[in-house]
Image: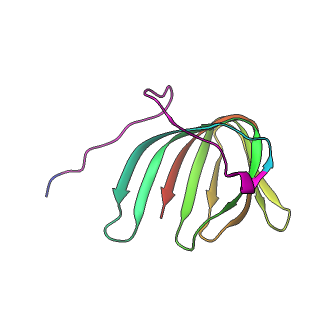
Amino acid sequence: MSAQPLLSFGLPVSGAPELSHPKPERLLRGNPLRETWNALDAPLNGAGELSSGVWRCEPGQWRIAFGPSEQEIFTVLEGCCRLHRDDGSFEQAGPGQAIRIPPGFTGSFEVIERMTKVYVIIK
């Protein structure tokens, strides 16, 4: 069995990011530019897919909805964000703090200060 290669990424990021904005029907505040440097897309032994990379976003807020098997954990490197639940409660994270978004989550994502995060998404 051959060893899997190790992957290293972080700040500063190199290369051109994928640029996007939240879908207009999901916007709650602003129209933030999102930059994504996806470093990895890999199958998980037939049980889904793993994606990981660096993401940067301008201030704004939009609705999010995760599928029944989709989840994310991210660590904020710079800036500040809030993850709002539908019941009005929220979690806030700044540099060095992490949040896990569980499968089936619905609510909204708010970027308070321009932020950069390292993410891992499992679908």
Q: Nearer the viewer, residue 53 or 22?
A: 22
Q: Is residue 10 in the magenta section? A: yes
Q: Residue 98: percent from the left, percent from the top?
A: 63, 49
> Does residue 6 appear in this view?
yes
Principal secondary structure, stretch drawn in magenta: loop
- Establish if 69 lies above or below 100: below
Q: Nearer the viewer, residue 24 or 42?
A: 24
- Establish if 2 lies above or below 60: below
Q: Residue 26: percent from the left, percent from the top?
A: 73, 56
Q: Is residue 20 in the magenta section? A: yes
**What residue is drawn where x is 42% and y is 57%?**
50
Q: Residue furthest right?
A: 88
Colour scheme of the picture: rainbow
**What residue is drawn where x is 15% and y is 53%?**
2
Q: Which corner quadrant holds the N terminus?
A: bottom left
Q: Residue furthest bottom?
A: 68
> Does residue 111 appear in this view?
no
Q: Which residues are magenta?
A: 3-27
Q: Residue 23: percent from the left, percent from the top?
A: 67, 52
**What residue is drawn where x is 40% and y is 67%?**
48
Residue 63 lies in what quarter of the image? bottom right
Q: Residue furthest front?
A: 24
How many numbered tags mark residues here? 0
Q: Residue 72: percent from the left, percent from the top?
A: 56, 57
48 displayed left or right of 102: left
**What residue is drawn where x is 54% and y is 66%?**
70
Q: Nearer the viewer, residue 95 or 42?
A: 42
